[in-house]
Image: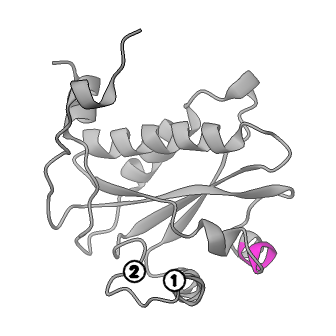
Amino acid sequence: MNDILNAIALRSTTRAYTDEALTEAELDTLLKAGLQAPTAANRQEIHISVVDGSNPLLAEIEKEKNVLSGVEPPVNFYYNAPTVFFLSGDSAFPWSALDAGIAVENMALAAEGLGLGSVIIGCVKGVLTGAKASEFAQALHFPEGYTFEIAIAAGHKAAGKDPHEYSMDDHVSRI
């Protein structure tokens, strides 16, 4: 099986990471994978903010998420990964959410190809588009007129997980 199909088959969400930081080469590879994703009308409007896992901003986002959801989960939204990437898009462009989703999948597959783990994150959308959206957008250095679309955390796996099982019969209709 070729490398791409193998990465697709093996990739699964990682919910435990070592303390080892990503190297500059690993960071650059993940960023390039995201930025090389296709975008509608070739707008290339996706912006990626890179946040170190120890940055207090992540704790602020987690605290606000817990307030909005009314629960205090035992782990944080990024599972203590050493790096979190926040993807934002032009709020006036109707395809930014889709473009960000494509970019984040490229990044997840690139992480798998590097032997890294990743978790795609949507649970903070309410926080990053809610009452404190402009405060967080400024802290995350989103360009003017951009809003949060999706995030991904990445790092060295401390625990693995088997990919999901699926049935073609249950999920595919051939017409």
Who's the residue at 24% across and 61% down the image? 156
- Residue type marked 2: Asn
Q: Is residue 114 above or below residue 63?
A: above
Q: Residue furthest top?
A: 175
Dividing the picture into quadrants, the one containing residue 57 is bottom right
What span is in magenta? 132-136
Of the numbered discs 2 and 1, the one sitting upstream in the chain is 1
Q: Is residue 166 above or below residue 141?
A: above
In the rendered image, residue 173 lying in the magenta stretch gets the answer: no
- Quadrant of residue 126 within the rendered picture: bottom right
Identified at 19% across, 39% down, the residue is 10
| Helix, strand or loop under label 2 | loop
Q: What colouring does the structure picture have?
A: one colour
Q: Residues within 10 Å of mark 2 (few under 14, many from 20)?
A: some
Q: Residue at x 60, y 84 (%)?
A: 68
Q: Is residue 134 magenta?
A: yes
- Measured as percent of width and height from the top left, residue 12 is found at 25, 49
In the image, is 37 to the left or to the right of 41?
Answer: left
Left or right of 66 in this view: 148? right
- Residue 140: horizontal and vertical position, in percent? 67, 69
> In terms of depth relative to the viewer, which is nearer, 76 or 31?
76
Query: Circles 2 and 1: CB distance less than 8 Å?
Result: yes
Task: Identify the secondary structure beneath mark 1.
Answer: helix
Picture disc at residue 76? 2
State whether residue 37 is above or below residue 30: above
Q: Which residue is mark 1?
A: 62
Residue at 26% over, 31% down = 170
User: What whole-number distance in Å separates the C-alpha atoms at marks 2 and 1?
Assistant: 6 Å
**Is disc 1 surrounded by few (<14), some (14 to 19) or many (20+) residues within 10 Å?**
many
**Magenta-drawn stretch, dominant element (helix, strand or loop):** helix
Residue type indicated by callout 1: Glu
